Amino acid sequence: MSYTHPVPEPAAILQAWLPFKHLLGVTTVTTEEDHARALALIDVLLDAVRDDESHPLAEILDYLAEHVQAYEAGQASIPEAEPRAVLRFLMDQHGLKQSDLADCAPQSRISDILAGRRGISKETAKRLARRFHVNADCFL
């Protein structure tokens, strides 16, 4: 399959890119300052684009979001922790009690896990992972 539309010359791309880059103030995210600027731009673009994926600014929003996500993935390091400590942390972060996890395991099992009397089974780890939107390996 060949591309049939003309490809612009590098000089023409540069002529369009430099003012765009200057206007945004950030086009790649490699520092905390870039990150802060990109997040501020994303907030403004989200207000403009809303749920309209065909909005002309939606592509810029996606572009910046991808760069922010890549930067954050490179910055975040999750320390090694016992599965029950991970569960406790996530429960605290989400303001949940043991009984709130009934969709994952009975309250008594969650209690035993948190007290260290029981490990987390693969099935329970999968349910917890779905609940908290994390990898099941966090609980194994």
Image (tube, rainbow, N blue to C red):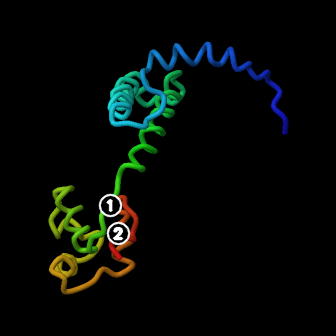
In the rendered view, does 102 fall on the left or right side of 135?
Answer: left
Displayed quadrant of residue 36: top left
Query: In the image, what residue occupies the spot 40% across and 21% down?
Result: 48
| Helix, strand or loop status at disc 2 | helix
Q: CA distance from mark 2 to mark 1?
A: 10 Å
Residue type highlighted by circle 1: Ile
Q: Nearer the viewer, residue 87 or 124?
A: 87
Q: Earlier in the sequence, mark 2 or mark 1?
A: 1
Task: Look at the numbered discs 2 and 1 and tell me whether their residues touch, using CB distance below 8 Å.
Answer: yes
Q: Position of residue 20 (x, y in %)?
A: 51, 17
Q: Position of residue 30 (x, y in %)?
A: 43, 37
Quick one: quadrant of the C terminus? bottom left
Query: In the image, what residue occupies the spot 73% across and 19% down?
Result: 8
Q: Which residue is mark 2?
A: 138
Q: Which residue is mark 1?
A: 78
Pointer 1: residues within 10 angstroms few (<14), some, or many (20+)?
A: few
Say if 113 sits above or below 27 in the image: below
Pointer 2: residues within 10 angstroms few (<14), some, or many (20+)?
A: some
Query: In the image, what residue occupies the spot 49% across and 23% down?
Result: 57
Query: In the image, what residue occupies the spot 70% across and 20% down?
Result: 10
| Helix, strand or loop status at disc 1 | loop
Residue type highlighted by circle 2: Cys
Q: Position of residue 24 (x, y in %)?
A: 44, 20
In the rendered view, does 131 fall on the left or right side of 13?
Answer: left
